[in-house]
């Protein structure tokens, strides 16, 4: 009596044997927009850090390291005005940041025109400029420190 199972669905055989199935195509590897943007940030920071370290050495690197905190505490516009007023490596750092934002948003590279664009920016635009400044500065901090390390290594050879 207990030999037969009730309500068991019959086994269904696949129309194609497992070995005959076509393997699923994997999606082609594509770089995401963020990865491409990260590469652009890295390349630009690498180039600008070479100029900054060549002209100002460790002082440039130290200024770069403190810049994100300065922007966080004082704001982007106040920080850019401070850097411009200080001159030297600070002004160069301000120029490098404005050059990057020009590439991304078409803003002006010139200090006064750039500041005017910040005054006229919508809150969304201003937030976008800030986010991009922080993202680019993360790369610049790393690249400048690496460049300075390269200079130290080559001077000991």
Image (cartoon, rainbow, N blue to C red):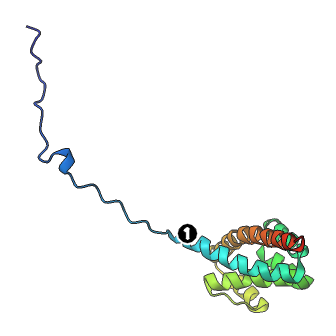
Closest to the observer: 46 or 109? 46
Closest to the observer: 150 or 14? 150
- Image quadrant of residue 153? bottom right
- Image quadrant of residue 114? bottom right
Residue most extreme to the front: 157
Residue, x 83% and y 84% (percent of image)?
Answer: 92
Mark 1 residue element: helix
Q: Which residue has dot 1 on it?
A: 34
Q: In which quarter of the image is the C terminus?
A: bottom right
Residue most extreme to the top: 1
Residue, x 10% and y 12% (percent of image)?
Answer: 3
Closest to the observer: 63 or 73? 63
Residue, x 69% and y 72% (percent of image)?
Answer: 136
Residue, x 12% and y 37% (percent of image)?
Answer: 12
Q: On the rendered structure, is 56 left or right of 102?
A: right
Residue 1, given in percent of the width and then of the height, sits at: 7, 7
């Amino acid at each position: 009596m207990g030999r037969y199972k009730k309500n068991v669905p019959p086994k269904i055989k696949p129309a194609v044997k497992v070995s005959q199935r076509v393997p699923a195509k994997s999606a082609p590897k594509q770089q995401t927009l963020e990865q491409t943007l990260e590469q652009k940030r890295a390349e630009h920071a690498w180039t600008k850090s070479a100029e900054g370290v060549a002209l100002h050495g460790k002082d440039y690197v130290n200024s770069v390291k403190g810049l994100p905190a300065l922007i966080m505490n004082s704001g982007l516009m106040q920080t850019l005005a401070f850097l411009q007023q200080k001159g030297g490596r600070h002004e160069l750092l301000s120029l490098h940041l404005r050059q990057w934002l020009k590439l991304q948003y078409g803003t002006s590279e010139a200090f006064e025109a750039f500041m005017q664009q910040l005054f006229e920016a919508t809150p969304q635009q201003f937030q976008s400029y800030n986010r991009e400044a922080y993202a680019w500065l993360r790369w610049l901090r790393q690249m400048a420190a690496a460049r300075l390390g390269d200079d130290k290594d080559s001077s000991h050879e």
